[in-house]
Amino acid sequence: MEPLKLRALALAWIVWMGTPLSGQDEDCRASGILSLAASPPPLPGREYHIESGEVFHFTLEARLETHFEGDWGVQGFSLSVAHDAGVLEITGATQEGTDAAEVFRPLGFERIETVDNATGEGFVCAVVLSLVQPVTLPPEGFFSLARASYRALLLPEDSAGVSTTVEYRDGLRGSAQPVRNRLTWNGRSVTPCVVPFSIRLTSLPPGIFLRGDFDGGGSVDISDAVAVIGYLFLAGRPPGCFDAADANDDGRLDIADPIFGLDFLFRGGAPPPAPFPRAGPDPTEDGHSCSSRAG
């Protein structure tokens, strides 16, 4: 079996992962490592800055790293991923577009569902790549297994922020039995190492934004240009703040904005107008705001 090409990991998914393991490296290499990666990525210090009153959404991708010996990789897996219900709300979970989905066969087994009951809130997932064929992931590499979407609950305007963690936690129960985080390799059950995803959500006053930061990640990079193009021409999600997406500050959101951003990032072009390189209020009296629409 040819190794999967990690196309999504390298091209379209600009992410931040949880803190890597260190002291357990050798044991974890033998058992696999489950981690979570976010899009958009948080700021340095693991923070998301959320404008007061803004509904903030982000996505977490469940990832697996393996270094198994031999020709066979993971044949199946089960995931139980929980979050703090007082801070986050899960809005959906899917396996579509993942590396696991790419090798899944019609005569396999798959189940994914969100959970909100006495065992906690989050999602559970179970996959057997094939019930009748020797189908596995490659024995070594990084693989996406599932994705879940979250909404951050509104923070008070004067909030100093709140820290929260999304983690692999055994015992969430969907419509059947409690689920544990396990891998199936070489016909046996393997307990992987797990890495939690911890962030801090900080409230910003209304009207505070960073020019050119389309995806609300707190920085201006190639993912912002990709997101603008996706919104304008591919029915992608709208920006959290239209004024921030107006990278050249001409009062419109159009193809000129991603071109301006790419020119700044990679060709030595002019930087975005204020507020940049730090978030702040818009000094331009153009009649636009974070709630404005494109045009």
Image (spheres, grey):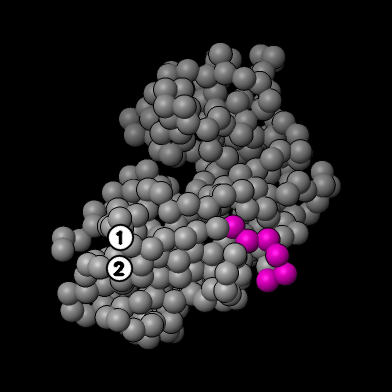
Which portion, as a residue range, is magenta?
Answer: 114-119
Front residue of this view, candidates 198 and 148: 148
Q: Residue 236 at what x, y percent from top left?
A: 48, 31
The answer, for residue 140, to whether it is visible in the render is: no
Which SS type dominates the magenta stretch?
strand
241 part of magenta stretch: no
The answer, for residue 5, to whether it is visible in the render is: yes
Sequence order check: which comes first, mark 1 or mark 2?
1
Q: Which residue is mark 2?
A: 131
Q: Residue 248 at what x, y percent from top left?
A: 51, 21
> CA–CA distance between discs 1 and 2?
6 Å
Q: Residue at x 33, y 45 (%)?
A: 11
Looking at the image, residue 252 sits to the left or right of residue 96; the answer is right
Instruction: Tell me: residue 35, above or below residue 28.
Output: above
The quadrant of the image that shows the C terminus is top right
Q: Residue 87 at what x, y percent from top left?
A: 72, 57
Q: Residue at x 66, y 21 (%)?
A: 292
